Amino acid sequence: MTNTEKIQKFLKSTSYIYCDDCLSEVLNIQPRQQVNQICNKFKKQGEIKREVKQCSYCSKDKLGNFI
């Protein structure tokens, strides 16, 4: 499974908000910048939302990814 597929499947399976750092940690994707690039692509395609919100995993106010 590609990293793109991992992120897509994970975000579709949860109602929680995850920042790039936490997605990188939870899905074991390195470097973290790859998560950023993939999520930016998904946002441009209208597949996900990216807004500053509280991350459900680390509880910090950061740019969060969610559907």
Image (spheres, helix red, strand yellow):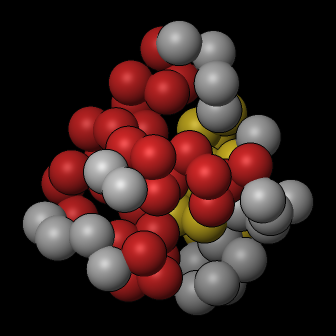
Residue 3 placement, left or right of 58:
left
Number of numbered discs present? 0
Where residue 16 appears, as percent x and y from the top left, is 79, 65
Q: Is residue 53 visible?
A: no
Q: Residue at x 66, y 33 (%)?
A: 49
User: Residue extending furthest left?
Assistant: 31
- Measured along the vertical axis of the image, is residue 61 above or below residue 51? below
Which residue does the image show at 65% across and 71% down from the upper left? Answer: 55
Residue furthest to the right in view is 15
Quarter of the image where the N terminus is located? bottom left
Residue 10 higher or lower than 24, as above or below: above
Which residue is located at x 59 percent, y 38 percent? 50
* In this rendering, position of residue 25 left or right of residue 50: left
Judged from this view, the residue extending furthest toward the front is: 1
Compare residues 28 and 61 and report the one nearer the observer: 28
Q: Quadrant of the C terminus?
A: top right
Q: Is residue 46 above or below residue 53?
A: above
Quarter location, residue 29: bottom left
Task: State the residue at coordinates (46%, 69%).
Answer: 23
Relative to 13, is 7 on the left or the right?
Answer: left
Residue 46 % position (x, y): 63, 15
Q: Residue 30: tell me if it is visible.
A: yes
